[in-house]
Image (cartoon, helix red, strand yellow):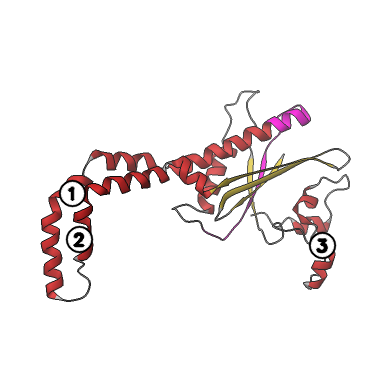
């Protein structure tokens, strides 16, 4: 069973999969997404930001003094003032920042976003297994086509982290039991021909010799095997 994944800046992950009947007609098309705000919320980043703002209120005056006494430039007076303010606020500032709550919060955030991604991919895998069981009466191998995006996402993670979490879940080896899951496969593909469906008129106006038939059409099984046009649409696997 195949599934397409596309990492992004606003949508952390967009997923799509389809089920076709034996006659080639589309029976079901499933979509799912995980937004960047969901990742930040479920990983605790938003709550940690609120906690930090609330805890910094305890030393708000000291932080304002430190910000005002910046040592920018080469002025000896500015440097002396910065040293004096730093020494005056030292006990209060470090008395707050050495509190165990800061270290505990940092430990909670360690790997939190990766865990959110892994839970999402585990949910997708279970949903695909359920569809496969209903359609064919068996849990078929899941093949994930991962968009090889060049964009980045803010917050300390990006397409590489998403791909790593996907492979960790999908390609996880089974326990060896006959009833256990079949390890899946993750294939990275270029996105230049899989992110849109071009009509013949639009393709000819753009100077393309052969119009793209789109990812949905290319993924449809054919009894005669894939055509050259279909193979060129779904990009090269790496």
For the residues labelled 3 and 1, the Cα–Cα distance comes to 63 Å
Q: Give the mark toward the camera: 1 or 2.
A: 2
Q: Residue at x 61, y 56 (%)?
A: 148
Q: Upstream in the sequence, badge 3 or badge 1?
A: 1
Q: Upstream in the sequence, badge 2 or badge 3?
A: 2
Place of residue 28 in the rendered image (x, y in percent of width and height, measured from the top left): 77, 39
Q: Tell me the number on the disc at residue 125.
A: none
Does the magenta portion include 202? no
Q: Nearer the viewer, residue 207 or 68?
A: 68
Q: Which residue is mark 1?
A: 94
Residue stretch in magenta: 130-152
Place of residue 182 in the rendered image (x, y in percent of width and height, measured from the top left): 65, 32
Q: SS at mark 3? A: loop
Place of residue 231 in the rendered image (x, y in percent of width and height, measured from the top left): 78, 56
Quadrant of image for the C terminus? bottom right
Q: Residue at x 72, y 58 (%)?
A: 196
Left or right: residue 104 compared with residue 119: left
For label 3, the crowd category at 10 Å Cα-Cα, with few meaning under 14, some 14 to 19 and many 20 or more, is: few
């Amino acid at each position: 069973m195949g599934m397409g994944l596309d990492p992004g800046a606003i949508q952390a992950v967009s997923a799509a999969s389809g089920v076709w009947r034996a006659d080639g007609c589309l029976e079901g098309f499933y979509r799912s997404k995980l937004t960047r705000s969901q990742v930040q919320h479920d990983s605790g980043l938003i709550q940690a930001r609120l906690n930090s703002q609330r805890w910094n209120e305890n030393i708000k005056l000291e932080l304002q003094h430190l910000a005002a006494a910046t040592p920018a430039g080469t002025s000896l007076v500015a440097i002396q003032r910065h040293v004096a303010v730093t020494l005056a606020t030292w006990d209060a500032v470090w008395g707050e920042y050495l509190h165990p709550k800061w270290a505990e919060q940092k430990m909670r955030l360690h790997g939190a976003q990766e865990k959110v991604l892994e839970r999402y991919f585990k949910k997708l895998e279970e949903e695909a297994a359920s569809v496969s069981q209903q359609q064919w009466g068996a849990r078929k191998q899941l093949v994930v086509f991962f968009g090889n995006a060049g964009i980045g996402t803010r917050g300390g993670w990006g397409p590489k982290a998403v791909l790593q979490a996907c492979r960790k879940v999908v390609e996880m080896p089974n326990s060896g039991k006959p009833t256990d899951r079949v390890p899946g496969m993750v294939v990275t593909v270029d996105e230049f021909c899989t992110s849109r469906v071009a009509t013949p008129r639009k393709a000819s106006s753009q100077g393309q010799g052969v119009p793209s038939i789109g990812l949905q059409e290319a993924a449809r099984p054919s009894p005669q095997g894939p055509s050259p046009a279909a193979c060129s649409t779904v990009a090269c696997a790496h």
